[in-house]
Amino acid sequence: MKILPAKADAFSKSPDSFIRAILLYGPDEGLVQERSKNLLLSVVDDPLDPFRIVDLDNDQLKKQPALLSDEAAAISMMGGRRVVKVRSAGDALAPYIKDFLQVPVGDALIIFEGGDLPARSKLRKVFEAEKLAAAVACYKDDEKSLPSVIRQTIEKEGLSISNDALGFLVTNLGTDRRLTRRELHKLCLYKGKNSGPIELEDAKACVGDTATLTLDDLAISVAMGNIQNLEKYLLRAQQESQNAVTILRAVSRHFQKLHMISGLVSQGTPLDKAIGTLRPPLFWKVAEPFKAQVRKWSPKALATALTMLMETEANCKKTGSPAETLCARTLLEITAKAPTRVR
């Protein structure tokens, strides 16, 4: 079965009892690890219990497929249900897992940790089709999911956060759930308890030096038609090891916001009121450039740019494609045609 993204976190903490095997996959490795730990703790109390937890990897199972049934059927010396973890799971394991699920043995929960598997992945198809299995996608946090992650993490530490600080963190975190959690815990330690809500100055002082601000600046440069800044921030993003798909998605998110607000304005909603509907609120640093872009870009032009970005992302995912070149070419074309560009 396929677990919907909105239910993925809850499922990882309390999976259905009849489920025997779960595949965690996606581009956010930190989120894969977080949900894998949640699943493990739903079965065992100690994540280091050597009697109830066994670690395998893709290559081991490829060489010895029988290990899957052997470990699933094994009984713990100390009693209790066991967990079998399989790291770096790939498509080569698909037929073995399908065979196992036809006649499963034992009662162990088997957790498979995969990478960013495409929709055509044989492994994904097995987990999505089988009744005793579940596939859980682990995508990077975005503007919809990240505010909740930030608030929950901070509130768990007994603190609160202002809207400005939240907007800053949403802009500068989210590429990896593990990194996001680490940065937030650091911020909470920096702020300390009984010292009021976390403000923008706290977030900038603690997170600003380590979290990348480049993608935000890059997206603004594209929408403003600033080719010089595009080249500067694109080079910086590549130096920070941001891949082409991540860059394209960051620019797409910015254009999606522009498209939504532009549509509201074209229907008669005042610009400031339309921008006020954004959640989380627009970060102060981009407010003025954002307004200028809304005034210049038409909904049709924004839709065209979004189509180009989505098509380029799809092409970047094709095997052997020169992703960085495709990304740079599309961004340059959109920037050069931007109605905000000063010629």
Image (tube, rainbow, N blue to C red):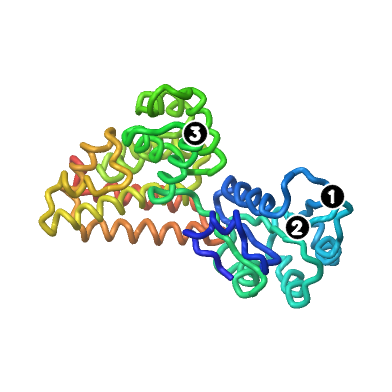
Which residue is label 2 attached to?
58
Q: Residue at x 33, y 61 (%)?
A: 307
Q: Earlier in the sequence, mark 3 or mark 2?
A: 2
Q: Secondary structure at mark 1?
A: loop
Disc 3 is placed on an element classified as helix
158 versus 5 height, above or below: above
40 relative position to 188: left or right: right
Mark whose residue sits in front, 2 or 1: 1
Q: Nearer the viewer, mark 3 or mark 2?
A: 3
Residue at 63%, 50% in the rendered image? 38
Decide if residue 94 is in sight here: yes
Where residue 197 sits, quadrant-wise, is top left
Q: Position of residue 30 (x, y in %)?
A: 58, 45
Mark 3: which amino acid? Leu
Q: Which residue carries the number 1 mark?
A: 51
**Amino acid carrying mark 2 in the image:** Asn
What amino acid does circle 1 point to?
Phe
Q: Nearer the viewer, residue 255 or 341?
A: 255
- Label 2: state its secondary structure: helix
Mark 1 burial class by Cα count in 10 Å: few <14, some 14-19, many 20+: some
Q: On the rendered structure, is 104 left or right of 77?
A: left
Marks 2/1: CA distance?
A: 21 Å
Q: Position of residue 284 (x, y in %)?
A: 27, 34
Residue at the spot of label 3: 184
Q: Count the marks.
A: 3
Which residue lies at the image location 29% right of the left edge and 42% below the top edge?
A: 281
Residue name at image x 21 percent, y 58 percent: 299
